[in-house]
Image (tube, helix red, strand yellow):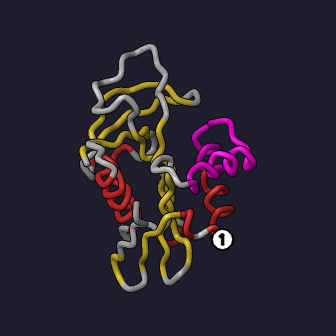
């Protein structure tokens, strides 16, 4: 699969993390921070170990980064994992749903549409793989995703917190 080289403006570029190993440590740190913010068990070493899977020659898991004038300003990941719960999940279009995860934009670059550019790039990547939908879990940012077309399909608990399980067609 070719690398998404979508440019939204002359200074904004989407790329695969695997093509920019110089940003690996920073992305792993962001992932670790987000896990801790959500109350999930995390260590930086664990985030680095898991992120290594994102830079191998497989379609999923995959991390996309966004650069502005060559500076790393955000990332988003696509992952496969089973969502364990005593409740039944709504019907999904595949046996192994793909989840949008670890959306992050550096604070000084927020409120500029960069998060949406990352989400769109992830949706395009998923569509190129032949996927029909993406999933995510959200707590604090449910409204953000709903305004962008994601629908809540159920509530569950993750890391001791109630989360909204959401999906969108790609």
Q: Which residues are magenta?
A: 32-56
The answer to if 49 sits in the magenta stretch is yes
Of 55 and 24, nearer the camera is: 55
Q: Residue furthest top?
A: 86
* Residue 19 figure quarter: bottom right
Residue ID at (46%, 27%): 83
Give percent across and percent down for residue 152: 30, 35
**Secondary element type, mark 1:** helix
Q: Residues within 10 Å of mark 1 (few under 14, many from 20)?
A: few
- Vertical arrangement, residue 98 with respect to residue 90, above or below: below
* Residue closer to the observer: 98 or 58: 58
Position of 21 with respect to 142 (left or right) is right
Total count of labels: 1
Residue 1 falls left or right of residue 35: left
Residue 88 pos. (x, y %): 36, 17
Residue found at x 62% / y 51%: 51
Q: Residue at x 53, y 66 (%)?
A: 107
Q: Is residue 23 magenta?
A: no
Residue at position x 65%, y 71% in the image: 22
The correct choice, above or below, for 96 with respect to 31 in the image is above
Toward the viewer: 14 or 54? 54
Q: Which residue is mark 1?
A: 22
Quarter of the image with the N terminus in it? bottom left
Is 40 or 60 nearer to us in this picture? Answer: 60
Which percent across, then down, holds residue 124?
31, 58
Chief SS of the magenta region: helix
In the image, residue 165 lies at what x, y percent?
A: 38, 33
């Amino acid at each position: 699969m070719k690398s998404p080289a979508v440019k939204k403006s002359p200074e904004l570029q989407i790329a695969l993390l695997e093509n920019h190993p110089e940003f690996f440590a920073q992305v792993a740190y962001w992932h670790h921070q987000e896990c801790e913010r959500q109350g999930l068990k995390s260590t930086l070493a664990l985030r680095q170990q898991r992120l290594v899977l994102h830079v191998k020659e497989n379609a999923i898991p995959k991390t996309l980064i966004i650069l502005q004038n060559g500076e790393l300003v955000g990332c988003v990941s696509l992952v496969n994992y089973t969502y364990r719960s005593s409740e039944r999940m709504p019907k999904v279009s595949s046996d192994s749903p793909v989840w949008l995860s670890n959306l992050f934009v550096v604070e000084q670059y927020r409120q500029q549409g960069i998060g949406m550019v990352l989400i769109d790039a992830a949706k395009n990547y998923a569509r190129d793989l032949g996927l029909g939908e993406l999933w995510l879990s959200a707590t604090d940012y449910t409204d953000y995703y709903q305004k962008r077309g994601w629908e809540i399909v159920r509530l569950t608990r993750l890391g001791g917190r109630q989360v909204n399980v959401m999906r969108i067609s790609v």
